[in-house]
Amino acid sequence: MLSRFITLAFLFLSFAAPSFAQSDPKDLINALGKANFKQAEELLGQIAATADPRVVPALEAFAEGDLYVRKSDNQVFITKPAGSNLAAIDPLTGETVAEEPKGAFTKVKVNNSLRRAIRSALGGLTLLSPDRSVRLAAAQAVLQSPSAENLDLVEAALATEQDREVKARMEEARAVSVLASDRSADEKRAAIDTVASLGGREAIGILMSVSSTIDESLKPDLDAAITGLEGQLLFWDGAQNVWYGISLGSVLLLAAIGLAITFGVMGIINMAHGEMVMIGAYSTFMVQQVIRTSYPNLFDWSLAIALPVAFLVTAAIGLVIERGVIRFLYGRPLETLLATWGISLILQQTIRTIFGPTNQEVGNPSWMSGSFALGGMTITWNRMWIVLFSLTIFFALLALMKKSAFGLQMRAVTQNRRMASSMGIRTPWVDAFTFALGSGIAGIAGVALSQIDNVSPNLGQAYIIDSFMVVVFGGVGNLWGTLVGALSLGILNKFLEPSVGAVLGKILVLVLIILFIQKRPRGLFALKGRAVEA
């Protein structure tokens, strides 16, 4: 009886010894030297399960292809070139053990599948780090490269995690790891719901990747989750297009709002309006150049400084154009159109001569850089600020038109020029200052556009036609019509572009506007008066 017990004990120890030996990180790393790809992947899971931070350099070297096995004793080392030899570095301690000829080593082979497993293992090893950012990055790494081998480690880290954001990300990492494991159907069903809660294309990709290996009983749950996610994506894609349309509409509003005033009050087709926008952008460039060279600490304030500069410069140019050219051409629309077109060419060539034909760099302040997520949408800060800025300019101009004496005079001239003149309003000076105001607002638009478009002599040409379309569609001289027209055309463009292309989309918009003005020649919001003059 005693002899039988001793025999059984001996057999138990003999079988347990290899398993115990394989728990040693050094032995596991050495085992990589002779392992095939499948065995290496299993060993990576065991290495990660040791939770030993010393193995991180070895795994990183493995991913980079710098892990070699020495032929003489099958020991695995990290190697670095040392002249004609290779320096053998202990994978755990980082100490150089020896220098030997390259022929003494054989490279431990790695493929893309193993690299994904390595990333997952590295993520698992850092899940218990005291640094919150490291744990969050580790959970993200496991989420992107799920592995059943890391499941126990993820669950252990999840049990001790206190940070809400990190814990939520670990829950997601656990869910994708469960889907790759042999856990029960109920656990996998719950994991599908967790992955589905992630939303977006990433979640669809994770669920699609396990569709071929998952139990047949879970296929309906998987298909339902994917269908739901695709519906969400469709909704958020539509919302993203609406945001892009609002963003484009705000740009069109900035470019058109000054034109709406001059065209509405004076009836002038100003082909040089786009050049006012361009000069405003170049004013921003000049302000930033001065700040960069003399006051670099003020760079985040460069746009705030550029706004009044651009307004004053373009308003002054507009006043000179009106007093010097346009006032002699009232009542002669063809001559006015040709004259302003000639002025636009002169301004373009002047800027081209001074600054050159190439694009100029206009930087983004820190508060306009980057983006943020809103649901399933991505919103850039520069576009967000431009939308808010354009609305601010709109309401400020609306207040000027409704609450100030100058605004009252402009509205009077717009609705009935002869009656306004008979009431003592100096219509020529109203025209002059209205043209200056419209030009100044175009200059402010140039400040905003410099943040999202190339600053070049041709900048204004890209917006002049769209600006006229906005003004005509919304209603000549009506600011609310300009707002509605800009946003409507912006959204319509963004919904047409994916299906018909940008160029054909603009053509279709133009055709629709032509058809629209056949029914409503004065636009959406026509001004009412005794005799509204075009």
Image (spheres, rainbow, N blue to C red):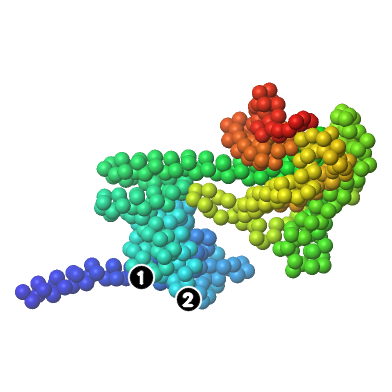
Q: Quadrant of the C terminus?
A: top right
Q: Which residue is mark 1?
A: 160
Q: State the mark number for residue 93.
A: 2
Q: Is residue 276 above or below residue 54?
A: above
Depth check: 201 or 152 in front? 201
Q: Is residue 258 above or below residue 419?
A: below
User: Does residue 125 appear to the left or right of 490 in the view shown?
Assistant: left
Q: Is residue 319 above or below residue 88?
A: above
- Image coords of residue 77 (percent x, y): 48, 68
> In the current view of this chain or complex, which residue is farthest to the left?
1
The amino acid beneath tag 2 is: Thr
- Image coords of residue 523 (percent x, y): 68, 31
**Which residue is drawn at the image coordinates 61% and 30% (left, top)?**
500
Q: Secondary structure at mark 2?
A: loop
Q: Quadrant of residue 76?
A: bottom left
Q: Residues within 10 Å of mark 1 (few under 14, many from 20)?
A: few
